[in-house]
Image (cartoon, rainbow, N blue to C red):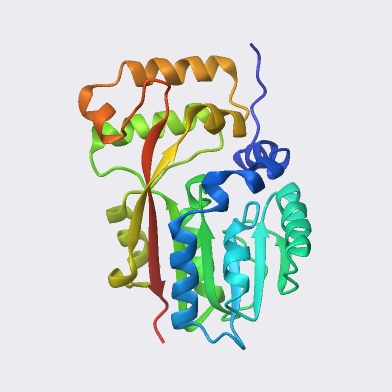
Amino acid sequence: MTTTAVPHQQTIQQQFDAQAQAYLGSAVHAQGPDLAHARQLAAQHLPAATARVLDVGCGAGHLSFALASQVKQVTAVDPSPGMLDTVRQAAQARGLGNIDTAQAQADRLPFDDGHFCAVATRYSAHHWTALKASLREMHRVLKPGGYLLVIDILGEEDALVDTHLQAMELLRDRSHVRNRALSQWHALLTQTGFDVQAQAQAQWPVRLEFASWVARMRTPALHVDALRALQQGAPDEVRQALAIEPDGSFTAQTGLLWAQKPR
C-alpha cells in the first residue's frame, strides 16, 4: 500500500472533516460526567450575565453546548470546517443562539489579549503538536483571574502501560500525538503560567467499545489487525490496567483539570 506524506495539520483535517456527524452522535463524546462537572464549575465561577468562553478544538461542539446555558457567549474554535459546520447546525437545532464559531488552530488564536473569562478544551489536546504554545495562547486570551478547563483522555503514569496506550491510539488514529498523564498536565500548566486548582480536579473511567472506536475514525483494516495483535500480546499488567476485553474494548481515564490565570 502506497501512502503520501502530508503535514500533521492536514492529517487532522482529513481525519475529522468527514467524521463530524459521527462525533456529534458518539456516546463517548455526547455525554459523560465530565460535562456535568464542567457545567457546575462554570456556574460556580463565571458570571452568567457577562461571561465569554472560548472552546478550543471544539470538535462536534458538545462542551460548547454544555456551557452555553451557563454563560453569555461561547466561541467554538476548530481547524476543521466540517466540525464547525456541524456545531453551527447542531446549535441552531438546540436553540442555542449564543454560540458562534471561528476556524483556527490552538497555537494561533485570532483574539485579543484578555478577551475571555474562561478558555476550555475537551478531547482535543492529544492532537496538538504545539501544546505549550497552545497553552500560552490560551493564557494570553484569558482575562487576569480567568479560568482554564482541560478535559482529555489521560496518559498513564506507568511507562509500560503508557507505551501500549499511546501505540493503540496511534494505530487507531494517525492524527494522535500524545495523551498526557496528570503529573505531566500539572507541570505543563504551571510552566505556562497557570495556577492549578487541585480541589476541582477529577477523573472518570471511560470504556471505549472497540468496534465503534475504530469505525468512528475509519481505521484501516491493517491497523485494526495490528491493534488486536498488540492487545493480545500485551503483558498481564497492561491488560489489567487498561481492562482490555476479549473483543478489544478497553477502559481509559478521562481527566478534568481546572486552572486559573493569576490576577
Residue 244 image offset from top left, x and y in percent: 34, 28
Number of numbered tags placed on the structure image: 0
Residue 193 shows in the view = no
**Vertical placement of 154 versus 47: above or below?**
above
Q: Residue at x 44, y 81 (%)?
A: 44
Q: Residue at x 41, y 29 (%)?
A: 167
Residue 57 image offset from top left, x and y in percent: 59, 55
Residue 54 image offset from top left, x and y in percent: 60, 69
**Vertical placement of 7 versus 258: above or below?**
above
**Vertical placement of 158 versus 32: above or below?**
above
Q: Quadrant of the C terminus?
A: bottom left
Quarter of the image holding residue 207?
top left
**Vertical placement of 75 versus 182: above or below?**
below
Quarter of the image holding residue 227?
top left
Q: Is residue 41 left or right of residue 115?
A: left
Residue 159 image offset from top left, x and y in percent: 25, 36
Residue at the top extreme?
Answer: 1
Q: Is residue 122 left or right of residue 188?
A: right
Q: Quadrant of the N terminus?
A: top right
Residue 221 shows in the view = yes
Compare residues 51 and 127 and report the one nearer the observer. 51
Q: Residue at x 47, y 67 (%)?
A: 38
Q: Residue at x 77, y 61 (%)?
A: 93
Compare residues 136 and 90 and report the one nearer the observer. 90
